[in-house]
C-alpha cells in the first residue's frame, strides 16, 4: 500500500500583491519551499499593487530617475505632518531607511524605472516611477516567483487561519464548501486591508447626523478582493487591531467612478487649483493648505464627512492643463450662475462663497509645483499661503 502524505510547506504566503510577492521571493531565495495563495483569478491578480505608479524613496544625492536629494529627515517630517504625528517613529524610520536601497532589489527582480512624465514632474525628486506602472511591477515579480519555483495558486481565498497556542498550524483555503487545509511551518499574512468590504466600512463609519451611511457612497479605487477576511479571522483569534478603521489613504474620486478598480484615472486632481464646495455651496477645508502631493490623500475623508458625501471642484480655465485630468468630463459654463444651476447648487450661497473667496485673495507668484505665496486673507478656512488664485471666470468643473 502506498501512503500519500500532504506536503507541509516551509512558508505559506497569503495574498498576491507587492507585499506577498516580496515576502515569497525573499523566503524562496533563502532556500525555503514557498506556496502563495491569491484569492483573485490570474487576470485580476496583484491587489491594489497593480494600481500603483511609484515608490517614494530617500536619497542623499540625485540618483538615475530621481532628481536632487530627499534626505531621511525631510521624508520623516513629511510623514509626521501628513499623519498629524500619529505614527510609529521607529517603524517609520526603518521604512524610510530601507527605501534608500530597495530599488536595487526591485531591479534585480525585473522592475524598471522611468523619469517622471509631465503632470508628475513635481514628484521627480521624491518618487521613482515604475515603467509600465504597478501592473508591470506585479507581473515582473510573478515572473521572478515562477522562475524561482514558487508555487502560486489563484482563486484560493483563505477563509480561516488555524492556530494552536498562538502558533500557526494551517490555513483553510478555497471556494466555500470545498476548503482545503494547507499546513506550513511559517505563514506570512499579506492579504491587504478591508477596504473592499462595504459592510465592514459601514460598521466602521456608522451613520452621520443626517442619518446617511457615508460608506454607501464610497468608490474603491483598488481591488475588489481585499475583503478583510483574514484580518477579521485573526482579530477574532486574539490579534490586536491597531489604528482607527476610518483613517485611510482616501483621495477624492469622481462620483461617477466604478465601485471597484477605478485606479488613478478616477482621481480628482484639480482640488488645489480652485475651491471645493459641498452640496450646500459651502467651502469646508483649505484647498491650498500645503503643496498638493502632500495633501491629496486627505480629501476623500473630508468629502466623506460632507452631506451626501459629495463635493464639487470649481476651477477656471487657467487651471486646465495643470493637473492630471480625470477620465470623466467636468461640467462647463460661461458664468457662475449657469455653473451653479448645472450642478444643482443653492445659487445664492454658491455665488456668495465664490465672491467671499475672490475678495479674500491676495496677490502672489503662482507656481503650483511648489508651495507658492498665493494666499487668502481673513477667511475662516484658509490661513496659509496657498496654491490658489481668484476664481474669476468659471469654465470647468469636475464633480
Ligand atoms: C489607485 C491606487 C494607487 C496607488 N498608488 C500608489 C503609489 O503610486 N505608490 C505607493 O507606494 N502606493 C500606492 N498605493 C497604495 C498601494 O497600492 C498599497 O499600499 C500596496 O499595494 C499594498 O500592498 P499589499 O501587498 O499589502 O496589498 P495588495 O496589493 O492590495 O494585495 C493584497 C492581496 O491579497 C489578496 N487577498 C485578499 N484577501 C485574501 C484572502 N482571503 N486570501 C488570499 N488572498 C487574499 C488580494 O487578492 C491581493 O492580491 C495606491 C493604491 C491605490 C488603490
Image (cartoon, grey):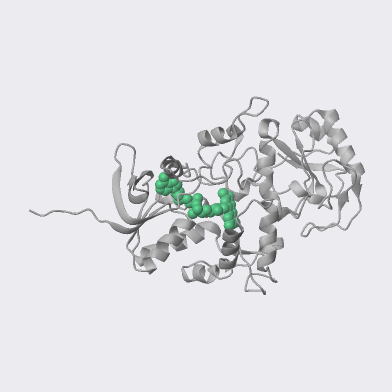
Is residue 39 among what the camera can see?
no
> In the depicted view, which residue is nearer to us: 221 or 315?
221
| Number of numbered discs | 0
> In the depicted view, which residue is nearer to us: 322 or 137?
137
How far across and down, in percent of the image, does residue 77 sit? 70, 60
Q: Is residue 175 left or right of residue 341?
A: left
Is 125 rendered above or below residue 264? below
Query: Residue at 60% of width from left, 37% of height from top?
Result: 218
How far across and down, in percent of the image, does residue 188 sit? 41, 55
Query: Residue at 34% of width from left, 40% of height from top?
Result: 175
Q: Is residue 95 left or right of residue 353?
A: left
How far across and down, in percent of the image, does residue 330 sit? 72, 41
Find residue 329 and report its image quarter. Answer: top right
Quarter of the picture holding the C terminus: top right
Query: Residue at 84% of width from left, 53% of height from top?
Result: 385
> In the depicted view, which residue is nearer to us: 255 or 330?
255
Q: Is residue 229 left or right of residue 169?
A: right
Toward the left, the furthest residue is 1
Amino acid at each position: 500500500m502506498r501512503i500519500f502524505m500532504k506536503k507541509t510547506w516551509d512558508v505559506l504566503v497569503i495574498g498576491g500583491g507587492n507585499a506577498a510577492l516580496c515576502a515569497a521571493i525573499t523566503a524562496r531565495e533563502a532556500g525555503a519551499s514557498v506556496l502563495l495563495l491569491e484569492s483573485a483569478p490570474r487576470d485580476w491578480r496583484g491587489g491594489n499593487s497593480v494600481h500603483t505608479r511609484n515608490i517614494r524613496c530617500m536619497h542623499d544625492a540625485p540618483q538615475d530617475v530621481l532628481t536632487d536629494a530627499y534626505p531621511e529627515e525631510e521624508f520623516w517630517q513629511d510623514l509626521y505632518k501628513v499623519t498629524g504625528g500619529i505614527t510609529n517613529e521607529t517603524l517609520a524610520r526603518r521604512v524610510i531607511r530601507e527605501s534608500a536601497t530597495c530599488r536595487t532589489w526591485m531591479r534585480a527582480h525585473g522592475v524598471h524605472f522611468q523619469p517622471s512624465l509631465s503632470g508628475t514632474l513635481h514628484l521627480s525628486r521624491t518618487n521613482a516611477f515604475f515603467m509600465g506602472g504597478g501592473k508591470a511591477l506585479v507581473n515582473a515579480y510573478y515572473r521572478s516567483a515562477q522562475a524561482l519555483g514558487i508555487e502560486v495558486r489563484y482563486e484560493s481565498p483563505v477563509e480561516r487561519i488555524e492556530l494552536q497556542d498562538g502558533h500557526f498550524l494551517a490555513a483553510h483555503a478555497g471556494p466555500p464548501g470545498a476548503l482545503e487545509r494547507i499546513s506550513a511551518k511559517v505563514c506570512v499574512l499579506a492579504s491587504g486591508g478591508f477596504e473592499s468590504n462595504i459592510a465592514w466600512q459601514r460598521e466602521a463609519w456608522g451613520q452621520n447626523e443626517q442619518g446617511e451611511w457615508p460608506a454607501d457612497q464610497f468608490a474603491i479605487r483598488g481591488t475588489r478582493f481585499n475583503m478583510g477576511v483574514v484580518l477579521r479571522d485573526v482579530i477574532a483569534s486574539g490579534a490586536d487591531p491597531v489604528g482607527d478603521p476610518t483613517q485611510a489613504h482616501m483621495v477624492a474620486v469622481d462620483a461617477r467612478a466604478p465601485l471597484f478598480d477605478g485606479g488613478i484615472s478616477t482621481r480628482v486632481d484639480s482640488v488645489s487649483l480652485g475651491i471645493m464646495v459641498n452640496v450646500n455651496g459651502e467651502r469646508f477645508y483649505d484647498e491650498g493648505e500645503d503643496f498638493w502631493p502632500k495633501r491629496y490623500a486627505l480629501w476623500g475623508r473630508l468629502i466623506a464627512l460632507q452631506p451626501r458625501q459629495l463635493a464639487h471642484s470649481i476651477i477656471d480655465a487657467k487651471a486646465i492643463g495643470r493637473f492630471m485630468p480625470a477620465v470623466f468630463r467636468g461640467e462647463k459654463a460661461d458664468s457662475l450662475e449657469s455653473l451653479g444651476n448645472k450642478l444643482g447648487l443653492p445659487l445664492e450661497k454658491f455665488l456668495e462663497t465664490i465672491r467671499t473667496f475672490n475678495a479674500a485673495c491676495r496677490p502672489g507668484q503662482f507656481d503650483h509645483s511648489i508651495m507658492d505665496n498665493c494666499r487668502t486673507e481673513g477667511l475662516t478656512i484658509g490661513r496659509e499661503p496657498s496654491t490658489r488664485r481668484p476664481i474669476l471666470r468659471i469654465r470647468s468643473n469636475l464633480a
